[in-house]
Image (tube, grey):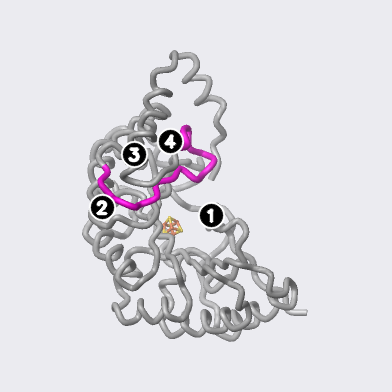
Amino acid sequence: MHMPEQLVIRPPSEAKSLLIRVIRGCDWNRCLFCGIYDLFGCAHSLRTLDEVKADIQALKALHGDCFETAFLGDANPLALPADFLVGILTTLRAQFPRLNRVTAYGRASSVWKKTREELAAIHTAGLDRLHVGMESGSDAVLRLQKKGTSQNQLIEAGARVKDSGMELSYYLLLGLGGQALWQEHVAGSVQVINAVKPHFVRVRRLWTHPASRLGEKIAAGEFIPQTPEGTIIELRDILKDLDAQDTTFTCDHANNYIQVHGRLNDQKTAMLSVIERFLALPDDMRRNHYESMPSVI
Ligand code: SF4
């Protein structure tokens, strides 16, 4: 029996989703802070449309039509031609008619290279939401981390996703500017989020594997990581300046020191209160909390 290929990672919000590998690894694979596909020994390569369709048939044979959501990986299915994605989505929707949400990872630069018509066709064929790694809105931080995008591109790509009718999740990485660029990181990220008003902002804390490209820079003293408390101050300062009505702001990953969740702008004050209450705790309690938190991808 044909066995479908597995994904390396998926967002936490896709924990119950049917997972479909439409491309292997990351076609960019240069972000200093990442290295996830290297750690798992997964090089980038393409799959044929027939291979992916065979996986979809096999998943149907294995599980039946029991999924309500599906997720396309690995890192950047949006690098694929629009007609390839339309072919996959059409097959997927035909085989799994109970799906009410299909999402994928996509790099901002790949979104930016698609025309408005292509993005609309992808959405019409069945892609409902894109998970995009914004990480930072600061050009200095994006350059430093070799993210391969810019503040302008994040704003333009984000607007195009929303115009196409798809939902947009932007991922924000606290601590990405280190101690040298944290204020630029805060200011630039606020600018992008306020300009785009994505449907979701999903917050993570920088976690650096010692063998990653950034880990080597830390070892060489070229990047000074943000302190635990510094990441919480970044979270507070970003949230404080956000004006993004109807954006869902969520720390939906286990590695955040503080988890706040809410809808902007209505629940901003409540989220800020959670952060301020934590920062008002005695020093030893805060320190114990930081030390008790796992460092996880
Ligand atoms: S963060 Fe995303 S785009 Fe950057 S190397 Fe990792 S998977 Fe690729």
Looking at the image, tell me whether mark 4 or mark 2 is earlier in sequence order: 2
Question: Which of these two is toward me, 136 or 271?
Answer: 271
Q: Distance from label 1 to label 2 (Cα)?
A: 22 Å
| SS type, badge 1 | helix
Which residue bears the numbered disc 3? 268
Report the residue marked by disc 4: 219
Front of the two marks 3 and 4:
3
Q: Where does the image place residue 152, in percent across and percent down from the top left?
A: 21, 59
Q: Earlier in the sequence, mark 1 or mark 2?
A: 1
Whether the residue carrying mark 4 lies under 8 Å from ligand 1 is answered with no
**Above or below, comparing residue 49 to residue 229 in the picture:** below
Q: Which residues are magenta?
A: 242-259
Label at residue 13: 1
Name the kind of residue labelled 3 in the image: Lys
Label 4 residue SS: helix
- Considering depth in this image, is 221 or 119 the residue closer to the camera? 119
Task: Give the Cα distance between marks 4 and 1.
Answer: 33 Å
Q: Are marks 4 and 1 in contact (CB under 8 Å)?
A: no
At label 1, counting other C-alpha atoms closer than 10 Å, the crowd grade (few under 14, some 14-19, many 20 or more) is few
Element under label 2?
helix
- Packing grade of label 4 (10 A; few <14, some 14-19, many >=20) is few
Q: Amino acid at mark 2?
A: Val
Q: Position of residue 226 (x, y in %)?
A: 37, 32
